[in-house]
Each structure stands twice: as C-alpha cells, then as structure tokens.
Amino acid sequence: MKQRFLPAAAAGELAISFGVTEPDAGSDTTRITTTAKKVDGGYIVNGRKVWISRAGEADRLLLVCRTTPREEAEKPTDGITLLFAEVDREHIEIQPIPKIGRNAVASNSLFIDNLFVPDEDLVGEEGKGFRYLLAGLNPERILVGSECLGMGRAALARATAYAQDRHVFGRAIGQNQGIQFPLADSLVNLDAAELVIRKASWLYDSGEPCGREANSAKYLASNAGFEAADRAMQVHGGFGYAEEYHIGRIWREVRLLRITPLSNELILSYLAQHVLALPRSY
Ligand SMILES: Cc1cc2nc3c(=O)[nH]c(=O)nc-3n(C[C@H](O)[C@H](O)[C@H](O)COP(=O)(O)OP(=O)(O)OC[C@H]3O[C@@H](n4cnc5c(N)ncnc54)[C@H](O)[C@@H]3O)c2cc1C
C-alpha cells in the first residue's frame, strides 16, 4: 500500500483526506457509528462524517469505520478499521460547511451510502485501526504546534513593527510598558513552546516515545500563538480589525488549532492520565 500510494501523495498527484470525526461521536472516536460490513471481495460502508477537510478535492479518503460494534468488542478501541477508500461521489455526498476561517480548504459533511471498498484498500488488519491511528497522532501534534508557532511569531513581528511606527500622545505606542510587556511575554511563551516542539521533534525523529512532549508542544504553541495574535490585534487598535493588516486572518487561523485536531482539553486529559497517572476522566 505504501508503494501504491505514498509516492503519488508525496508528489502532490494524489489528494488525500482523513475521515475520523462524526456528528454524534465527537472526540470519543470509539463511538463512531460508520460501519464497514464484510462482503465478498471487500466492504460496504455506510455512515456520516463531519468536518472532513479537502474531501471535495480528494482522490482517496482514509476512512475510520467500525467493523465490530463497540458493545461487542473486547475493548472500546477494538473493532475499528481503516479503509483507504476511493472517493466515489456516486456513494459519498459531500457538503461543504460554511466556516469562519481556514477557507483555503473546504471542510465537509459526508453522507456515505453503500460505498464499496475492495479488500486491497484495507489498511493493515481489520479491527486494529485505532492502534494505527495513534501512530500518526504525535507527528501531527508536532506539526500543528509548529504551525501555531509560526503564526504566533508572524503576529508578534507585525505587532512589534506597528508598535514602533504608530505614534499616539506624541510618542511611539511601543514606548509604553502596557504595550511592551504583553509582547515580551508572548516572546517568552513562544520561545518556550519552540523548545518543547524541538524536543518532541528530536524524540520522534530518534524513534523515541514522545507522547508527553508532542501533546505539550501542541498545547503550549496553540495557546502562545493565539495569545500573540490576540495581543497583536490589541496593539493595532482599530486597524487590527481591518483586513489590510492581516492580524485578523492570523487570529482566526491560529484560534482553530486550540480545537483541532484534538482539543486542548483532551490534551490535558491525556497528560493527566498518561503522564501523571491520574484516573482516566473520560
Ligand atoms: C476547520 C476544521 C477542520 C477539520 N478537519 C477534520 C478532518 O479533516 N478530518 C476529521 O476527521 N476531523 C476534522 N475536524 C474535526 C476536529 O478534529 C474536531 O472538531 C475536534 O477533534 C473536536 O471534536 P468535536 O468538534 O467533536 O468536539 P466535542 O468532542 O463535541 O467537544 C466539544 C468541546 O467539549 C470539550 N470536551 C469534550 N469532552 C471533554 C472532556 N472529557 N473533558 C473536558 N472537555 C471535554 C472539547 O474539548 C471541546 O472543547 C476538523 C474540524 C474543524 C473545525
């Protein structure tokens, strides 16, 4: 499968979308109800997905389905299967969700009706999909943390430049500690987030466990990035609200990443349970 798909995906010739989230399951992936029923030569899939980015352009969809109902599985995470399905528009209705940002790509509701997926498009073993999903989560969190860091740094650079240029009450607004301190505080928070991102990346590249660091990196960077963007908006005064200064764009984009791909609350739950060994809360 890697041979079949990854070179084309890396070359940008094969567009891929990732279908986990469902309207009624939320962050609890074990409660998905999209089912893949075994038939001769493959599976028949039925169900609904929501927020699936790029589905409209995708050739293939990494589809997370249940092959065994949750109540019949030994563990809630068992019985989940990954299919690398062709996006057959005869059997998948795709409806874009109007959204307040991230409009470079559409995110969509999917209505999947009797979609046939051949056996050759089953990823790994049936029923073990949840485990395979976990393997991709840490690098995704490091990547998302890095996006937030970049947006935070961009916002801070714009805020700093504006604070030098903008004169009010006869002097640059950046001469006021009320302007300087939040910006310097954001610098510290972004630098701290960057160090954790680098540590997480190094561990991941070295093949070491990095759940703690990858989750912390995403958490710290998404908070520091949004805080920097919000402060940049304040420093720009009314112009922070004008499209021309791009602060609003950064503000909207970085805000998303406190919610996706995993919300910051669920990241704290992970750290509480897996690092602090507190009881599972969800
Ligand atoms: C623009 C965009 C693009 C997306 N792209 C994709 C995609 O390509 N593929 C895909 O599969 N999904 C995608 N998603 C979905 C995204 O991953 C989910 O929205 C996200 O994981 C949160 O899940 P939810 O929306 O179901 O929130 P819910 O699970 O309904 O949670 C709602 C709120 O309650 C909080 N909460 C829930 N349980 C607990 C708890 N136990 N303790 C404390 N707080 C809790 C959550 O943190 C959150 O703040 C996208 C979403 C957006 C907005």
Image: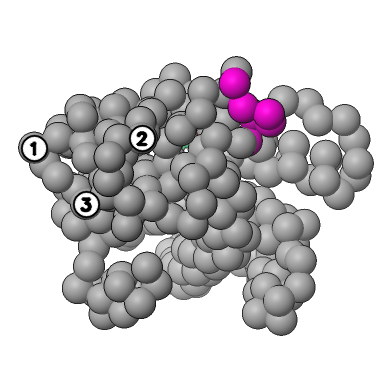
For the residues marked 1 and 2, what is the alpha-carbon distance in whole angstroms?
20 Å
Residue at the spot of label 2: 38
**Residue for point 47% across, 52% down:** 254
Does 142 lie within the magenta span?
A: no
Please tell me the numbered disc located at residue 90. 1
* Mark 3 nearby-residue class (10 Å; few <14, some 14–19, many ≥20): some
- At x 76% / y 66%, what residue is drawn? 209
**Quick check: can you spot residue 136?**
yes
Separation of residues labelled 1 and 3 (CA atoms): 11 Å
Query: Which stretch did the figure color magenta?
Result: 72-77
Say if the magenta span includes residue 76.
Answer: yes
Q: Which residue is mark 3?
A: 86
**What main secondary structure does the magenta stretch of the protein show?**
loop
Q: Tell me the quarter of the image containing the N terminus.
A: bottom left
- At label 2, counting other C-alpha atoms closer than 10 Å, the crowd grade (few under 14, some 14-19, many 20 or more) is some
Amino acid residing under circle 2 = Lys
Relative vertical location of residue 202 with respect to residue 46 in this rendering, above or below: below
Residue type pointed to by label 1: Glu
User: What kind of residue is marked 3?
Assistant: Glu
Q: Quadrant of the C terminus?
A: top right
